[in-house]
Image (cartoon, grey):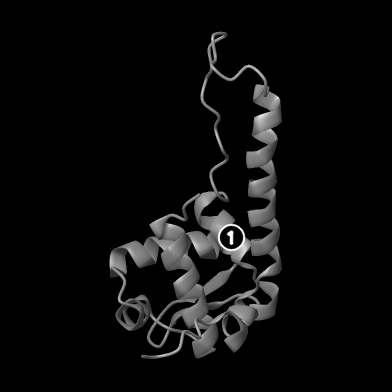
Amino acid sequence: MRASKKAYYGLRAAAALGRHGGELSVHELAHAEEMPEDYLHKILQSLRKAGLVMAAKGQGGGYSLARDTADISVWDIVTALDGGFKNFSPPRLSRASPYPKLTHCQTNQVWKSLEQSIENTLVRMTLAELLTSSYRNDTPKK
């Protein structure tokens, strides 16, 4: 399974808003996170519609998180932008399948279990946790 660029940018933007703790303009956020401004604006609008960020208009306005970082899961962001991860779609098999011993339904359970595990992990993982050292890449420097 693969996360979309939209979900990837959306998670980075939400994390940046959480780190900042206040309002950031689309321009400031795009510059800080090295993202295309127009694309980021669309992402932030989707996150606003989902109730994850707030927008303030006018001079000094910008975007901020609508809830505390501990109350926003990674899954919230992924579903707001992509509707979750794409479900596994099994290939259509003919009756002359070369593997008759395992049924279509039995093998599909593998993929459904994997999808559920991914969802459960992302539901438990919050922005607050991402902003702590527990989820940072602590790879030793060479």
Q: How many residues crowd mark 1 within 10 Å: few (<14), some (14–19), many (20+)?
A: some
Q: Amino acid at mark 1?
A: Ala
Instruction: State the image coordinates of residue 142 (x, y, percent, origin top left).
Output: 36, 90
Seen in the picture, residue 92 relative to 11 is either above or below; the reply is above
Q: Would residue 6 appear left or right of 73 to someone viewing this image?
A: left
Foreground of the two, 94 or 100: 100
Mark 1, residue position: 50
Q: Hey, which quadrant is residue 49 in on the image?
A: bottom right
- Report the residue at 58% width, 60% height from top: 50
- Report the residue at 34% width, 83% height from top: 32
- Report the residue at 66% width, 40% height from top: 110
Asked whether residue 102 is in view, the answer is yes
Asked whether residue 22 is in view, the answer is no
Instruction: State the image coordinates of residue 102 (x, y, percent, origin top left).
Output: 67, 24
Describe the element under mark 1 as helix, strand or loop: loop
- Report the residue at 63% width, 81% height from top: 128
